[in-house]
Image (spheres, rainbow, N blue to C red):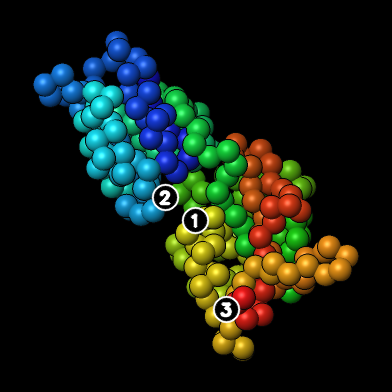
Amino acid sequence: MRRMIGGALAGVLALAACGTADESETPSGDTGGTKTVKLQLQWFVQAQFAGYIAAAEKGFYREQGLDVQILEGGVDIVPQTVLAQGQADFAIAWVPKALASREQGAAITEIAQVFQRSGTYQVSFADSGIKAPADLKGKKVGNWGFGNEFELFAAMTKAGLDPGKDVTLVQQQFDMQALLRRDIDAAQAMSYNEYAQLLEAKNPKTGALYTRPTSRSSTGTTSAPRCSRTRCGPTARSCRTPPSRTRRLSSSPAR
């Protein structure tokens, strides 16, 4: 079985441990007592992989007897496929993608989960009236595809919607431009990437940044938002917006 790391944040200790968990398997190579292994990233080198990169740079892996070669991902690279084909010893991918690959016969297994909750958001402006998955009915819903749609589809299905009939699915680029132009009513965004892009964008009507309101009224309720977010479950089984964790964007000036 090939080994999969679920999620995409710093799993330094998990990677070091899983590299020695199954001594019966032969890694990519052996250099002076140090085992050479290849780690396939699920996207281009960026901050979400900082833990893995820092561990390699600081020699943490080598202290555990591992020479970790980090392989950059990209649009046309499917980590779990690279892993299943033996071109890497470890790979990083979202749990739903790994499960789908297993269902298709890929001999891979998850050995670490570094996200407690999914980092996939579905974001919409508050004036669109979308507060929960059920509110997506009749809307133009953006998604990236490539396996990123599994959580979104599961959330809509749980809410009683048919993704193929009740919404208009739009192939979304890997940015937030379609949402900012109001070409779509809801867009996919990662907590550590595209969602930040929204917070760095300006409302063309006011010239002010879209922000998450932090002020509270005397009753303790959060001020009116301009953009809301739903978070989908890490195993593609649920989608929810916990009041204590919901992030919203406002057209008021940044504070």
**Cα–Cα gap, marks 3 and 1:** 18 Å
Amino acid type assigned to the residue bearing label 1 in the image: Tyr
Sequence-wise, the earlier of marks 2 and 3 is: 2
Between 110 and 34, the one lying in front of the other is 34
**Cα–Cα gap, marks 2 and 3:** 24 Å
Is the residue 179 above or below the residue 24 in the image? below
Amino acid type assigned to the residue bearing label 2 in the image: Gln
Report helix, strand or loop for mark 2: helix
Residue at left 56%, top 51%?
120
Q: Residue furthest top?
A: 24
Seen in the image, is 181 located left or right of residue 185?
Answer: left
**Cα–Cα gap, marks 1 and 2:** 7 Å
Is the residue 139 above or below the residue 111 in the image? below
- Residue pointed to by mark 1: 192
Sequence-wise, the earlier of marks 1 and 2 is: 2
Mark number displayed over residue 209 = 3
The quarter holding residue 188 reads bottom right
Residue at left 62%, top 62%?
123
Is the residue 200 above or below the residue 95 in the image? below
Callout 1 touching callout 2 (CB < 8 Å): yes
Q: How many marks?
A: 3
Question: Callout 1 environment at 10 Å: few (<14), some (14 to 19), or many (20+)?
Answer: few
Callout 2 touching callout 3 (CB < 8 Å): no
Question: Callout 3 environment at 10 Å: few (<14), some (14 to 19), or many (20+)?
Answer: many
Res. 173 in view: yes
Mark number displayed over residue 48 = 2
Residue at left 69%, top 56%?
246
Q: Position of residue 196 (x, y in %)?
A: 51, 64
Amino acid type assigned to the residue bearing label 3 in the image: Leu
Q: Position of residue 68 (x, y in %)?
A: 25, 33
- Where is the N terminus found, in terms of image quarters? top left
